[in-house]
């Protein structure tokens, strides 16, 4: 029998997965609503089951990378990022750097804030990932 804490974690993760699937199959006009839904569920999902939920950040990063105009969700992202434990973002440093340096659209302040918090808490992984990103970028330029 699962505890109520585990059941809440499953519920929040399922809602986030549903938001991702709906985002992928929806029209351009309603995509932003599903993105907001996925962002809103993140703190609760991480609070109730952080180990499993942090893997679902890949879906959120995919939605954020695909979205052209993130100005609508920037303030929402900033509020959510303040609630996230920094260690949950640790395995996603390369993806956060890629989104931050994406030239398709301007980077929201929320991603810079994520990188800043990661750099303060985990300087070595941050430095290594950034160095790898710049080396790969230089190889592409040649």
Image: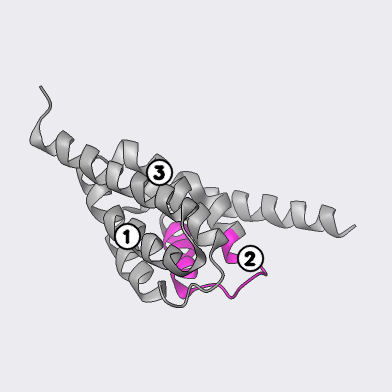
What residue is drawn where x is 45% and y is 57%?
118
Nearer the observer, 7 or 15: 15
**Where 36 sits versus 93, above or below?**
below
Tell me where residue 112 appears, x and y as whole percent.
49, 69
Q: Which residue is mark 3?
A: 56
Q: Find the residue positioned furthest to the right.
A: 142
Real-space CA distance between mark 3 and mark 1, rounded to the nearest whole angstrom:
14 Å
What residue is drawn where x is 29% and y is 61%?
40
Nearer the observer, 15 or 55: 15
N-term mark: 2 or 1: 1
Q: Is residue 119 magenta?
A: yes
Q: Quadrant of residue 65?
A: bottom right
Q: Which SS type dominates the magenta stretch?
A: helix
Real-space CA distance between mark 2 and mark 3, rounded to the nearest whole angstrom:
22 Å
Q: Which residue is mark 1?
A: 37
In this picture, which residue range is highlighted in magenta?
Answer: 99-120
Q: Residues within 10 Å of mark 1 (few under 14, many from 20)?
A: some
Nearer the observer, 29 or 63: 29
Q: Which residue is mark 2?
A: 101
Q: Which tag is nearer the camera, tag 2 or tag 3?
A: 3
N-term mark: 2 or 3: 3
């Amino acid at each position: 029998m699962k505890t109520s804490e585990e059941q809440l974690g499953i519920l929040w993760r399922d809602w986030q997965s549903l938001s991702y699937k709906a985002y992928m199959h929806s029209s351009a006009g309603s995509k932003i609503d599903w993105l907001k839904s996925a962002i809103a569920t993140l703190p609760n999902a991480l609070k109730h089951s952080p180990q499993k939920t942090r893997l679902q950040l890949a879906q959120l990063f995919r939605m954020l990378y695909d979205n052209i105009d993130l100005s609508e969700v920037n303030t929402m992202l900033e509020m959510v990022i303040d609630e996230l434990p920094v260690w949950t973002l640790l395995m996603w440093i390369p993806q956060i750097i890629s989104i931050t340096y994406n030239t398709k659209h301007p980077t929201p302040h929320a991603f810079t804030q994520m990188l800043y918090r990661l750099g303060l808490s985990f300087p070595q992984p941050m430095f290594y990932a950034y160095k790898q990103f710049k080396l790969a970028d230089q190889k592409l330029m040649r």
